[in-house]
Amino acid sequence: MTNPTDRRRAPAMSPERRREMIIRAALPLVVEYGTSVTTAQIARAAGIGEGTIFRAFGDKDALLAACMAEALRPDDMLAHVAAISTTLPLAERLIEAAEAMRGHLARMGAVASAMAVSGLLQRGAPRGDAATEDSSGEQARPPASSREESMAATRDVLTGLFEPERDSLRLPAERLAEAFQFLVMAAGRGPTPLTAAELVDLFLHGAMKDDRSG
């Protein structure tokens, strides 16, 4: 029989990993409840004691600001787009990229909207890589440096999707990637936004029907 005192303890979680775990548990609650979410609710979702949250973040506002920063990080979206196989037809590549970008923008908007109600954004929480709207409908702009870095990183991974067709493109891959990026950001707004497939078809083939077959 193994002596309980001989059992090894599981490695302690690093402070950074613990913060990440708390943020992951908090994000869905922030979207659902906004800033009225309690640290007790977050602690239950994370499976930890409430005091652990305060040791990791100091106070609730610091945790909410960290949630905002995490929602704005494009890392997951960039990794998804970069992993799209270039053996797929270009239209399929771009549809998958557009859906990944829209998912990131939707998460960013949901968290930003939840935060804006309390004025947390106005008190200096970080903002995202694209403009978002607060509860008054006004555009909220992120710091220029973070926005430019995120936009540039997105352009880079999108450029890679155009590379296999570089010799048959009407414009350089870099310029098409930039145009597609802004189209995705703009076409997701409005009462009847284009689907990803509609957006890509419009981007690749234009607005006019092809009547040359007749």
Image (cartoon, helix red, strand yellow):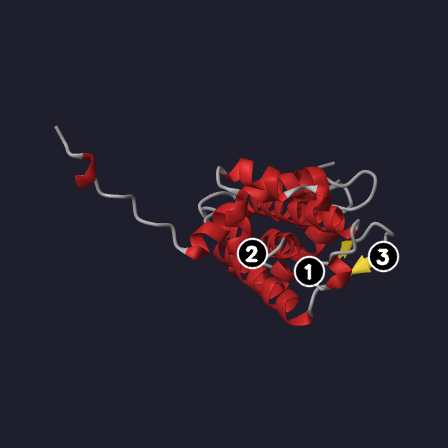
Query: Mark 1 to mark 2: distance in Å?
Result: 19 Å
Quadrant where the C terminus sits is top right
The residue at which mark 2 appears reads as: 57
Q: CA distance from mark 2 to mark 3?
A: 30 Å
**Nearer-N-terminus badge (1/2):** 2
Does residue 150 lie above or below 93 as drawn? below
- Tell me the residue at 65%/65% (across/down): 147
Q: Earlier in the sequence, mark 2 or mark 3?
A: 2
CA gap, disc 3 and disc 1: 14 Å
Disc 3 crowd rating (10 Å Cα; few below 14, some 14-19, many 20+) is few
- CB contact under 8 Å: marks 1 and 2: no
Disc 1: which residue: 127
On the rendered image, what quadrant is the N terminus found in?
Answer: top left
Residue 96 visible to the viewer: yes
Residue 141 lies in quadrant:
bottom right
Q: Position of residue 39 (x, y in %)?
A: 61, 44
Dot 2 alpha-carbon crowd within 10 angstroms: few under 14, some 14 to 19, many 20 or more? some
